[in-house]
Image: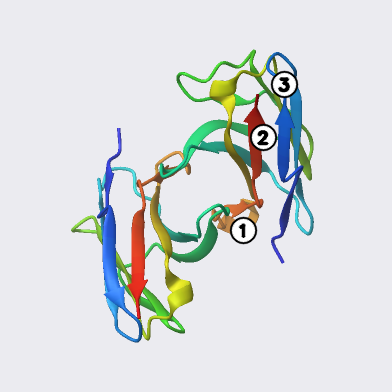
Amino acid sequence: GAVVSQHPSRVICKSGTSVKIECRSLDFQATTMFWYRQFPKQSLMLMATSNEGSKATYEQGVEKDKFLINHASLTLSTLTVTSAHPEDSSFYICSARDAEGGAYEQYFGPGTRLTVT
Amino acid sequence: GQNIDQPTEMTATEGAIVQINCTYQTSGFNGLFWYQQHAGEAPTFLSYNVLDGLEEKGRFSSFLSRSKGYSYLLLKELQMKDSASYLCAELDSNYQLIWGAGTKLIIKP
């Protein structure tokens, strides 16, 4: 159980275009989903936290108008990188948590490697 | 804010035992997680400790001392596939994970 899928796994886009990344919890309802970014040889950096049906909470320094997050259902969250630039190239990872019953572990999707040319 | 400290890199020999330490600030503590992350892949859950003591799961064990703000991950009978980064993360008072920078473990034959 506790499987999280992420699509696409790899995407290359041109500077100025937008890219949408989907994160799905396949066998549980994710009350909360998290979006992380990870640059090579660095640790995870939390970008935002989203609860189903409400606006995402962004970490300091993360532009909410550039990284649009939608968590419309208990099994799907999307991250849209708008007007992407080469410095947005990174490994984007989502995770999901079902906090019912007091479990707080996060289950991660396989990640999306974004390259902006 | 919360600070999570763990060594940047460790090296061990195949078949041996290695202990990866993690210290955290104790205010608002709700548990301590360990994750494994292979290069280019997403992290996978290893363990969760909320009470003091040692929890064993096969070759991997995790220990917690809440009074000392200290945890360790113990890996026994090391295999080459254990080469990865090991991330320590504290569940804070808001039930959010505060991540350490990770310990890169290198296994040598």
Foreground: disc 1 or disc 3: 3
Alpha-carbon distance for marks 1 and 2? 17 Å
- Quadrant position of the C terminus of chain B in the picture: bottom left
The residue under label 1 is which amino acid type? Gly
The residue under label 2 is which amino acid type? Asn
Residue A101 — which label?
A: 1
Q: Do marks 1 and 2 share a subunit? A: yes
Quadrant in which residue B103 is drawn: bottom left
Q: Is residue A68 visible?
A: yes
Residue A33 — which label?
A: none
* Residue holding disc 2: A51
B55 lies above or below B3: below
Question: Residue at the location (35% across, 46% down)?
Answer: B101
Please tell me which of labels 1 and 3 falls first in the chain.
Answer: 3
* Residue holding disc 3: A14
Please tell me which of labels 1 and 2 falls first in the chain.
Answer: 2
Foreground: disc 1 or disc 2: 2
Please tell me which of labels 3 and 2 falls first in the chain.
Answer: 3
Question: At numbered mark 2, what does the secondary structure look like: helix, strand or loop?
Answer: strand
> Dot 3: few (<14), some (14–19), or many (≥20) neighbours within 10 Å?
some
Q: Nearer the viewer, residue B52 or B86?
A: B86
Question: Residue at the location (38% across, 76% down)?
Answer: B61
Alpha-carbon distance for marks 3 and 2? 31 Å
User: How far from the left and from the top, in percent, is residue A25?
Assistant: 75, 51
The residue under label 3 is which amino acid type? Lys
